[in-house]
Image (cartoon, helix red, strand yellow):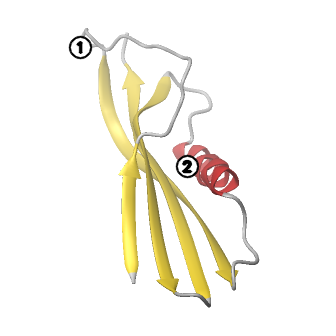
Amino acid sequence: MHSARVGNLNSNVTNVELSKKNFKVVDKVSGTSTATYIFGIGGHSNKALIEKAKSKMLENANLIGGARAIINLTTESHISIIYPIYFKRTITVSGHIVEFTD
């Protein structure tokens, strides 16, 4: 059995107004984290998986040294189950990289 859930579970405190045409979308970036549970034992918590996936996304984004930001953050959760033995959760965090031109 497989299921998937997509949602914006992020809480960001940085606000950037993108009302002017002073930026361009340069790339899409993502990071993934997976945990496997046997009889409900093992793996990380959902929060830890999200943090790990977000950290991998930021590593892949290469934001250092430029006027760039990640927008449109999305968190996806995919679950595979063979009840009650096997449970696998994969979290993917993705977003678009914008580069400011002015």
- On screen, residue 53 versus residue 8, left or right, reads right
Quarter occupied by the N terminus = bottom left
Q: Give the percent coordinates (x, y) of residue 79.
A: 47, 72
Q: Secondary structure at mark 2?
A: helix
Q: Which residue is mark 1?
A: 21
Q: Secondary structure at mark 1?
A: loop
Q: Earlier in the sequence, mark 1 or mark 2?
A: 1
In the rendered structure, find residue 57 and report the number of the disc placed on it.
2
Q: Residues within 10 Å of mark 2 (few under 14, many from 20)?
A: many
- The three-letter code of the residue at mark 2 reads Met
Closest to the observer, 101 or 18: 18
In the rendered structure, find residue 51 and report the number of the disc placed on it.
none
Residue at image coords 39%, 78%: 2
Q: Is residue 85 above or below residue 3?
A: below
Q: Residues within 10 Å of mark 1 (few under 14, many from 20)?
A: few
Residue at image coords 31%, 33%: 25
Q: Give the percent coordinates (x, y) of residue 67.
A: 50, 21
